[in-house]
Image: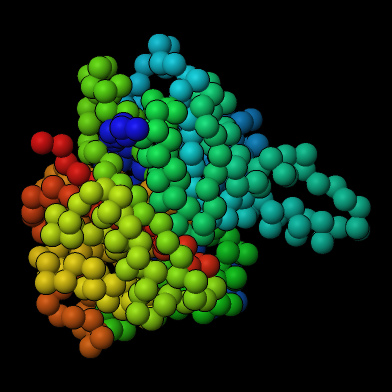
């Protein structure tokens, strides 16, 4: 069976450094940090009191007030980003065959704030179970794609992938395969997360996963730096319209890039720590290259998982050297988490958008906040430190890894 070609025809972004695709790109190339003291709750007794929150975002600027109240923030974010991506794609919702349009979304945690608040309210009461009737529909991770499909009438495949921080990358790979196999013409994919909450911050602090650089939040996310001390939690959403190539061409759609392939693997090693030699990461990048029919030397740019954790950054760069050999030093490697923080289940989506826009504009966004070299990291690797670099990019890779050893990798190609 001949596989269909799949292309990107729409993008939407809601991030800590920009509330639209264009604002996000501007934040990326200007090296903007999204980290700041948390405004959502009192952090006085928390080990970490900062995060990458959205800025100047008001859900009711985009959503009906009654509808917004029925949604957790992660769903609100999904609705806003997907609306932008659908509009960007110029898909005609009146004429498209909605039976062949799906929504496959990623969320690592889902409605954490809703769950947290309902339980806290119950605990503070007299034991009478007075729960909000929208508690479950707001909390469940699959509700974001459900709401996107309800609003737009999309009747194709509709579900959420949950693989921690790899969730939205897994969603994109599933969407790619549904279209490749001829089951759909268009899929809205991506991911959203809203874990900057009491429970989210407390839980990640208890794991010693977060940076505690409270005196300097803007410089706390410092992938590959020798003084990095953990990731910075972020929130938001990224939406990508994937479309069958002939379908897109027939309607004259703008094509950002072709999706050449996706790879998946498991570390099979530890709940939260990566394999020190990057065994699973090596496997996922090799799987992705094979799936795309590419050679290592075809890749120009890698947007790494690069979370700013002591173990993870080293393991990923070791894996890149193993897979790409001498060509590794010719690749522009970066970590946009230095600016956005870690959006957990939405990370794969917003970082794929960054890679796609880097191809379109011929500029690789920087890895900011790098001051101190790490003796465990090869100095010959081009980590695009602190300053964006102009470069023609024909093929870009996006890596995303999640707790539990979940690894996902996606490859994009600029159309000739």
Q: Residue at x 66, y 50 (%)?
A: 114
> Which of the 4 image quadrants contains residue 96?
top left
Q: Is residue 405 visible?
A: yes
Q: Name, please, the residue furthest toward the top.
A: 95
21 sits to left or right of 101:
left
Q: Where does the image place residue 181, in percent across and percent down from the top left?
A: 39, 33
32 and 39: which one is in front?
A: 32
161 sits to left or right of 16:
right
Q: Residue at x 46, y 65 (%)?
A: 266
> Which of the 4 image quadrants contains residue 342?
bottom left
Which quadrant holds the C terminus? Answer: top left
Above or below: residue 150 compared with residue 128: above
Q: Where does the image place residue 389, in percent across and percent down from the top left?
A: 10, 59
Q: Where does the image place residue 336, in percent across and percent down from the top left?
A: 29, 60
Q: Total label count?
A: 0
Q: Residue at x 40, y 28 (%)?
A: 182
217 sits to left or right of 298:
right
> Which of the 4 image quadrants contains residue 308?
bottom left
307 and 30: which one is in front?
A: 307
Q: Where does the image place residue 262, in percent across and percent down from the top left?
A: 34, 50
Which quadrant holds the N terminus? Answer: top left
Q: Residue at x 75, y 59 (%)?
A: 120
Above or below: residue 198 compared with residue 30: below
């Amino acid at each position: 069976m001949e596989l269909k070609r799949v292309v990107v025809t729409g993008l939407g972004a809601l991030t800590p450094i920009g509330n639209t695709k264009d604002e996000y790109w501007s934040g990326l190339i200007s090296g903007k940090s999204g980290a700041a003291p948390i405004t959502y709750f009192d952090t006085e007794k928390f080990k970490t009191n900062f995060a990458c929150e959205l800025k100047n975002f008001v859900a009711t600027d985009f959503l009906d007030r009654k509808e917004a109240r029925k949604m957790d923030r992660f769903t609100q974010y999904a609705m806003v980003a997907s609306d932008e991506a659908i509009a960007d794609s110029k898909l005609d919702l009146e004429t498209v065959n909605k039976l062949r349009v799906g929504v496959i979304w990623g969320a690592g945690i889902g409605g954490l704030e809703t769950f947290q608040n309902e339980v806290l309210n119950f605990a503070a009461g007299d034991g009478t179970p007075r729960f909000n009737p929208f508690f479950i529909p707001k909390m469940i991770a699959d509700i974001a794609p459900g709401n996107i499909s309800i609003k737009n009438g999309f009747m194709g495949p509709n579900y959420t992938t949950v693989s921690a921080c790899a969730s939205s990358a897994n969603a994109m790979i599933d969407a790619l395969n549904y279209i490749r196999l001829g089951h759909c013409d268009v899929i809205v994919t991506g991911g959203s997360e809203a874990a900057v909450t009491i429970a989210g911050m407390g839980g990640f602090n208890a794991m010693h996963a977060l940076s505690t650089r409270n005196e300097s939040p803007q410089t706390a996310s410092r992938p590959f730096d020798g003084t990095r001390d953990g990731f910075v939690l972020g929130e938001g959403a990224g939406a990508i319209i994937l479309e069958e190539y002939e379908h897109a061409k027939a309607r004259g759609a703008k094509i950002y890039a072709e999706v050449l392939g996706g790879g998946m693997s498991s570390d099979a090693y530890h709940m939260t720590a990566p394999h020190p030699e990057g065994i699973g990461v090596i496997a996922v990048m090799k799987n992705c290259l094979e799936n795309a029919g590419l050679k290592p030397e075809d890749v120009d740019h890698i947007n790494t998982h690069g979370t700013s954790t002591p173990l993870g950054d080293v393991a990923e760069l070791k894996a890149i050297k193993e897979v790409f050999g001498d060509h590794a030093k010719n690749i522009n490697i970066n970590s946009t988490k230095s600016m956005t923080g870690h959006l957990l289940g939405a990370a794969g989506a917003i970082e794929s958008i960054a890679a796609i826009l880097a191809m379109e504009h011929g500029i690789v966004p920087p890895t900011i906040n790098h001051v101190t070299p790490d003796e465990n990291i090869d100095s010959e690797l081009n980590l695009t430190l602190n300053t964006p670099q102009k470069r023609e990019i024909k093929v870009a890779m996006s890596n995303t890894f999640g707790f539990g050893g979940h690894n996902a990798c996606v490859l994009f190609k600029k159309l000739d």
